[in-house]
Amino acid sequence: MQDRRPLAIALMGPTASGKTALAVDWAQALGTEVISVDSALVYRGLDIGAAKPDAATRALAPHHLVDVRDPHEIFSAADFAREALPPMQALAARGRIPLLVGGTGLYFSALLDGLSDMPQADAATRAQIASEAAMHGWAALHRQLAQVDPDAGHRIQPADQQRITRALEVYRLSGKPISQWQREGTARAFGFRVLRLVLAPADRGVLHERIGRRFDQMLAEGFLDEVRRLRADPRLHPDLPSMRAVGYRQAWQHLEGDTDAATFRDQAIAATRQLAKRQLTWLRARPDARWFDPDTDRNALDRALRDFVTRP
């Protein structure tokens, strides 16, 4: 039976792989718009350090899911999945093909694969967890998580307060580990037929060079001044998801006086490389995605796009 679902394109890849430039070209060629799949771009004020597309770029290719939260707010994968679907549907209703572009694997998974029907956030449970953390420390809460859910305890870092809270909350509300919820998932057919493409240099050294060059450009453009402005907001602190974003965490520590300029630069670049490594690991687990080198495979990329949009 012919698949009559509307089309969508998922342009995935590690940070600094050139996704934005290609997305703008394709958005103009297709007369469509971009759905950003990036956990830093959702936050207002995270501009330079998040490599947020500037106004000129967004005039060429409108972007959705950019600047939709203040940096003191939380934006989950479930929030993303819920808020990404309406602009996709609106584009499809106009005969346009949504371009999903970014590197946040959890967001892609939430939207394309669905999230398990685990318990919703519960304010009382979260307040109790926060009280315990204030009394005993987050390391103790992480040990507690590792006892009831070894998989989550191994996967979640001891300093990741948001994920520790969520994992313990789910366990306390349901009696079932969050890892089990996630494994069981929610089987469903997504409402779009999606072409999944990965943009990644074949040579890891090329990606590392791009990361270093881009970070130096961010510094030249005033990244530290941007973080100074953010730090002046009394609602912000370094444990928020927005301020834990790569680059911002290291800049905050540097402005606290914890590191000198050279150490800050080295740590930020190293953290960005680690992020790219995690992104690539997630992408390799996607057997439905086709890989392309942005420097050598542009013709093949354009051909893959044409084949997808023209085939019945």
Image (cartoon, rainbow, N blue to C red):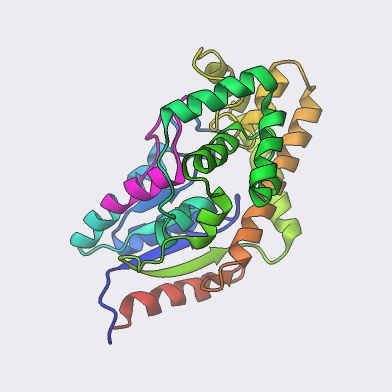
Check residue 243 for magenta coloring. no
The residue depicted at 41 percent of the width and 72 percent of the height is 305
Q: Is residue 289 left or right of residue 191?
A: right
Residue 130 visible in the current orientation: yes
Outermost residue to the front: 175
Residue 98, above or below 234: below
Outermost residue to the bottom: 1
Per the rendered image, the range of residues in magenta is 64-86
Q: Is residue 141 left or right of residue 179?
A: right
Residue 242, above or below 17: above
Q: Position of residue 71 (x, y in %)?
A: 47, 27
Residue 271, above or below 43: below
Q: Position of residue 99 (x, y in %)?
A: 38, 59
Q: Nearer the viewer, residue 174 or 223?
A: 174
Q: Nearer the viewer, residue 290 or 84?
A: 84
Residue 225 visible in the current orientation: no
Image quadrant in which the C terminus is located: bottom left
The residue depicted at 51 percent of the width and 73 percent of the height is 288
Image quadrant in which the N terminus is located: bottom left
Outermost residue to the left: 94
The residue depicted at 26 percent of the width and 51 percent of the height is 86
Q: Position of residue 125 (x, y in %)?
A: 48, 30
Q: Nearer the viewer, residue 208 or 197?
A: 197
Counting labels gives 0
Check residue 68 for magenta coloring. yes
Q: Tell me where residue 135 sits by quadrant.
A: top right
Residue 84, above or below 202: above
Q: Position of residue 259 (x, y in %)?
A: 79, 22
